[in-house]
Amino acid sequence: MRSASFLLWGLAPLLLSAQLTGRVGPLKSAAEKAAYKTCNVLDYGAVADLSTDISEPLLDAFADCNGGGLVYVPEGEYALSSWVLFDKGKSWALQLDGVIYRNGTGGGNMIAFDHTSDFEMFSSNGKGAIQGLGYEFRIAGESTNTRTLRLQKTSSFAVHDIILVDSPAFHLSLDTVTDGEVYNVVVRGGSSGGLDGIDVWGENVWVHDVEVTNKDECVTVKSPSHNLLIENVYCNWSGGCAIGSITSGTNITDIIYRNVYTRSSNQMFMIKSNGGDGYVRNLALENFIGHGNAYSLDIDSAWSNIATADGDGVEFSNITVSNWKGTEANGAQRGPIKILCPDDNPCYDITIKDFAMWTETGDSQTYFCQSAYGDGFCLQDGDDLKEYTTTLTATSAPTGYAAPTMKEDLSEGMALNTSIAIPTIPASFYPGVTPYSRIAGGSLAAVTPSSATVTPSSRVVSPSRAATSSSSFVAWSSSARVSSSPRPVGSPSFTKESPASSWTRATGIPTTTAAMNTQPTNAIEKKPSADTEVVVGKCGFVPPPNQKLHDHVHHNSPHHH
C-alpha cells in the first residue's frame, strides 16, 4: 500500500484533481501472507517439465491459500494447457519465480483474476514470466483472441517484476480496477497491431517503470477512467501511449502521463476517436522524449480505424502538454503536432509549452490544428469557438530539441514468425531517472535521478521462513507500506500563460497556412535554412525573436458552435 498524493499549482485551468486519490497496492504484504500460509504448486502436482499442465495445481493451491495466503511457483519451466480463472480472491498473493509457457490453443484469457481484492502478483527474482508463444498461431495462419493476463473488477492490488512475452493477442488488461499499482513490468510482443501492451481503465491506479515492445498500445487509457498516474514509461518499438479508442459515452478525467520515452513507435501520444460524445478532461502530458516515431502529439477526432459514432464528437478540454523533446521520423509527412478536433465540438483550454521536436528526414515539419483552442503553436486563442484549420511549416530546427537516448533501444521490432526471447527488466525506464522501486533480483538502477524524482526506498522484506523442499518461498516484496517520502512527486505548475517562445495572438482569419523558421543553438542539430525574410502573418500571428514566418492563406466560412 502506498499513501500517494500531490498538488498542482498554477492559474486556471488547474488540474487540481489529477492525482491519486488514496492508497494503492495490496492491504497486506506478501510477507504477511506467506507467514500465514504458503501453498507451493509443487505440492499440488505441478511439474516443471514443460509438459504437465499447471492449471489445476494453480487452482488447487489458490483454493487452499485464498483468504490470507501466498501461492508460490518456484523457478522452472511450466506448461499451461488450460486457462486459469482466479475468481473472488481476497487477501492473497501469487509469487511467480518460474516461467509459464502457453501450451493450450483456446481463446480468452490465459490467466485471469476476477472480483479480487488485496492481491499481489510478482516475482522475487525478476525472472518470473509468461511466454505466450504467439508466433505459433501466426505461422499457422490462425487468428486468435488469446490474451495473456487480465485483472477485472480488482481492487487494492499490485503487479510487479513480471515479464510478459509474445502474447497471441493482448498482454496485460486492467479492466475496471481501483487502487492498483503496476511497476517493474516488461512486455515484449511481436511487431503487429492487436498485440496491446498495457490497457487500463479504472480509478486511482499508478502505472510506473514499465517497458513495452509491440506495434500497438504501449500504456493506453480506456473509458471510463479517473485519477490515473502513468510515469516512467519506455515504449521501445511500440505503438505508443494513447487514450482510446473512444466513442459514445466517453468519461475520462484527471490523467497524468509523465516521463515517457518513445522509440521507433507509431506515436509518442495519441487520442483516438471518431464521432461519439462524452469528454476527456484534465490531462497532463509531461516530460516526453521521442526518437524516430511516425507521429509525436496526435489528437485525432476523425480516426479512420474505427467507425464513426453518433454525436458531435468527444469533448477534449484542459489538456497541458509540456517539456517534449526529440525527433520524429519525417516532419513534412507527419508533423510533431497534429490536433484535429470536432468542428461541431471544438477542443478548448489546451496548452502546449516547452515543446521542441525536429525531423530526422528533410528540413521542414508541420504543425496542424483544427478547431482547437488554447495557447501554443497552431492553437487559436479566444472563447468564441469556431471551426478553423491552421497549418504552420517550420523550415529550421527549434532551440533545444536534442534529447538523450536509452542504451536498451532496439534496432528493430520483434519478428512475428519466430520465438521471442524472454528479456530482462531494464535498470531504468526513462533517461536519467531511477525506478521508484528496486528491480527484483537486482539492485537500484545506477542512474542519476532527475530533479523531479526521489530516490526510492527499498521494498525488501526479510524472509518469513526458511526455505524447505516443499516451500522455498522468499518473501522479497511488500507493497503494503506507507512511503516515508512524498510520492509520487508533485508535478510542475500548470498555467494558462503562454511561454515566451510562443506566438502573440489576435482573433481573426479562421483558416491559415503559415510557415515559420526557428534558429538552432546546438551545433549537432540540423542547420537552419538560409531564408531570412520576416513577415507578420495575416492571421495575426507575430513571430517571436529570431523566428521568421511566411504565410499562405485560404478561407472557410466559419460557423458558431
Image: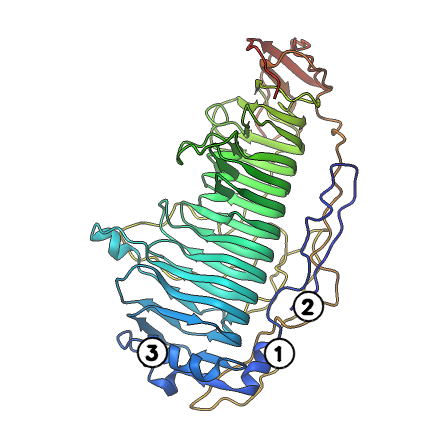
Query: Circle 1 sits on which residue?
Result: 461
Residue lying at the far left of the rendered structure = 140
Residue 22, percent across and down? 68, 61
C-alpha distance separating marks 3 and 1: 30 Å
Neighbours of disc 2 within 10 Å: few (<14), some (14-19), many (20+): few
- Given residues 545 and 301, the one toward you in this image is 301
SS at circle 1? loop
Query: Circle 2 sits on which residue?
Result: 457
Query: Circle 3 sits on which residue?
Result: 56
Picture mark count? 3
C-alpha distance separating marks 2 and 1: 12 Å
- Given residues 133 and 306, the one toward you in this image is 306
Q: Is residue 465 above or below residue 313?
A: below
Going by the numbered disc 2, the residue's amino acid type is Ser
In the image: residue 403, left or right of residue 375: left
C-alpha distance separating marks 3 and 2: 38 Å
SS at circle 2? loop
Residues marked 3 and 1 touching at CB (< 8 Å): no
- Given residues 69 and 344, the one toward you in this image is 344
Quarter of the image where one finds residue 504: top right
Residue 452, percent across and down? 71, 51
Q: Quick one: label 3 or label 2, which is nearer the N terminus?
A: 3
Going by the numbered disc 3, the residue's amino acid type is Glu
Q: Quick one: label 3 or label 1, which is nearer the N terminus?
A: 3
Q: Is residue 306 above or below residue 534?
A: below
Q: Is residue 44 above or below residue 501?
A: below
In the image: residue 279, left or right of residue 273: right
Going by the numbered disc 1, the residue's amino acid type is Val
Residue at (38, 77) in percent of width and height: 58
